[in-house]
Amino acid sequence: MADVNGTWLGTYWQQGTPTRFEVTLIQSGNTLTGRILDDSNLGEAQLAGEVVGRRISFIKRYFTTSPDPITYVGTISENEDYMQGQWSFKFWDSGPWEARRSGETLLADLQTRIQKKVSLSGV
């Protein structure tokens, strides 16, 4: 079973328009809980779901804008640093989503890029 504990940065597309989000996942066995903060006027949401093997599924509910559930299903990569899938809202809206694990590896990558830019600009 995949381990998805931690913070992830992602994007979902609604009618071709991307929205960035940050999600913190807490996994206990197959059970999944967490919080999502969308980079839009929709705000913060809670989630509950499960991880079975490399399959992830959860229901997202916004705290203030809409109590209606949004269903996410997807697949987790073998190295457990990327996931992607489809979201759906009722029967009339859906789209793709993806997320990458956040944390020290992304921060280290960013620092490496900054150092390369600094050393190149000093030449």
Image: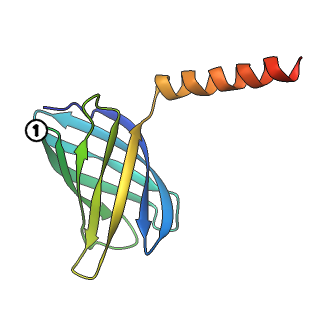
Q: Which image quarter: residue 61?
A: bottom left
Q: Which image quarter: residue 107?
A: top right
Which residue appears at 22% of the width and 30% of the height?
3
* Secondary structure under the numbered disc 1 in the rendered image: loop
Q: Percent x, y for residue 79?
A: 29, 28
Q: Percent x, y for residue 36?
A: 38, 52
Say which of 26 and 112 sits in front.
Answer: 112
Q: Which image quarter: residue 7?
A: top left
For the N terminus, the image quarter is top left
Residue that extends furthest to the bottom in the rendered view of this protein: 92
Examine the rendered structure and indicate whether residue 25 appears above or below residue 95. Answer: above
Residue that extends furthest to the right in the rendered view of this protein: 123
| Side of 23 where 47 appears, left or right | left
In the picture of the structure, the residue carrying the numbered disc 1 is 30
Which residue appears at 71% of the width and 25% of the height?
114
Q: Amino acid at mark 1?
A: Asn
How many neighbours does mark 1 have within 10 angstroms: few (below 14), some (14-19), or many (20 or more)? some
For the C terminus, the image quarter is top right
Q: Percent x, y for residue 87?
A: 28, 64
Number of numbered tags placed on the structure image: 1
Examine the rendered structure and indicate whether residue 40 appears above or below residue 55. Answer: below
Say which of 5 and 94 sits in front.
Answer: 94
Colour convention of the picture: rainbow
Examine the rendered structure and indicate whether residue 89 appears above or below residue 19. Answer: below
Which residue appears at 66% of the width and 26% of the height?
113
| Side of 82 where 49 appears, left or right | left
